[in-house]
Image (cartoon, helix red, strand yellow):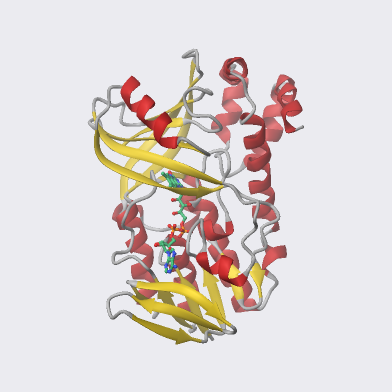
Amino acid sequence: MNITIIGAGPIGCYAGYLLAKEGHAVTIYENHPQIGSPIQCTGILTSDFDQFGFPLDSFLVNTINSIEVYSPSQKKIAIKQKDYIVCRIRFDNFFADRAREAGAKIFVNHSFLRKEREKLVIKDIIADRELIISPEIVIAADGPLSPTAKAYGFYHPQRENYYGVQAVVEGVFEPQTIKTYFGNDICPGLFAWIAPESTTTARVGVATLKNSKYYFDRFMKEHHFTAKEMQAGTIPVYHPKQRLHKDNCYLVGDAAGYVKATTLGGLVPGLQQAEILARCILEKREYQPELKPLRKKLWLHRQVHRIMAKFSDQDWDRLITYVGQPHVRKVFESYTRDNPIPLLSHVLWNEPRFLRFIKYLW
Ligand SMILES: Cc1cc2nc3c(=O)[nH]c(=O)nc-3n(C[C@H](O)[C@H](O)[C@H](O)COP(=O)(O)OP(=O)(O)OC[C@H]3O[C@@H](n4cnc5c(N)ncnc54)[C@H](O)[C@@H]3O)c2cc1C
């Protein structure tokens, strides 16, 4: 089959690799001149990434073994968790190289412009000319604002996007610890983070629905950081009603909004979704039903995010007290953020006072 993928991010390239290695003619169009650049990501992966069996050494920057959570009144807990920090340029190119080796063609400097009936119009930016193509299948892997999903008319109008701002900074850091800071004055609706690359360099950022730069500047000032390099980008909030397939077009990754709403991590769910999409195309299965297990997890993240968005500073202190109890912390140390169903059921079983927060769903 003749398959076109719009967007050479990691998710589009992974889907391209999986389909090309089965003999399909895959073409990937990317509007930027270089794959993986500009960087718009902190590059944190949970250890669930191990399930894919990729060789980490080609893009690994650091391995984390603890996450510290700070409440607005500086109450702190540390949770043992193994995470990876990757270089997004090398990470994205790893997937692009796999796709090419499997036979996919990748054209950079080629931007999806519009849909004209059954055809797509792609602009060759360097040659300044338009190409008209008629693929049998179109995969929209073109990120959170997905021009392709919009052109096909199924980008859900109520989708929300966070805006993340981050900097690479120098300082003195505990190299195996990610620090997260919660509170309405710090980063409303989410958290600020310090993710170390090493003992001397870290990625520091915030993500909010609005005024991200204001909160970012405040956080930087409070911690006496100076930006060596700035990065920013849009991150979608998972929307359960987002349609994922229409006509011959499928959405995947950020284009589909497949991001954990509590942490805005999209890499592990996006890669899992790419595998499901490839299987559906190869085995002629319906996409939406096959996504049910992944959708359940993302739906749960969305509910927890809705609750956390209404937390008062006192609630954050309470939460930290509950999580700090050894038997509750043990539960948080037994499951990654990519497994919210067993995590939350065991947490509620071990500390029923968490139920008090459910009122925030209404
Ligand atoms: C500040 C920030 C921090 C983040 N931190 C993390 C983190 O620590 N861990 C994590 O898991 N996730 C994180 N994320 C989210 C993560 O970056 C995304 O989930 C991930 O990049 C999704 O991959 P993708 O391939 O779906 O989309 P993208 O990586 O966005 O790739 C889409 C590609 O499509 C291209 N494109 C767009 N429009 C067109 C067009 N018209 N024509 C052709 N090509 C087009 C884009 O140039 C891009 O290369 C973060 C995001 C931000 C903004």
Q: Is residue 105 visible?
A: no
* Horizontal and vertical percent position of residue 121: 47, 80
For the N terminus, the image quarter is: bottom right
* Horizontal and vertical percent position of residue 134: 52, 87
In the drawing, does residue 147 fall left or right of residue 165?
right
Compared to residue 102, the image places residue 165 above or below, namely above
Compared to residue 56, the image places residue 214 above or below, namely above
Between 2 and 334, the one nearer to me in the picture = 2
The quarter holding residue 128 reads bottom left
Image point (37%, 25%), residue name = 218
The quarter holding residue 215 reads top left
Between 327 and 187, the one nearer to me in the picture = 187
Q: How many numbered discs? A: 0
Image point (55%, 39%), residue name = 336
* Horizontal and vertical percent position of residue 35: 32, 63
Between 143 and 271, the one nearer to me in the picture = 143
For the C terminus, the image quarter is: top right
Image point (56%, 85%), residue name = 136
In the drawing, does residue 102 fall left or right of residue 296?
left
Instruction: Ligand 1: give its quadrant.
Output: bottom left
* Horizontal and vertical percent position of residue 353: 72, 19
The quarter holding residue 292 reads bottom right
Q: Is residue 250 visible?
A: yes
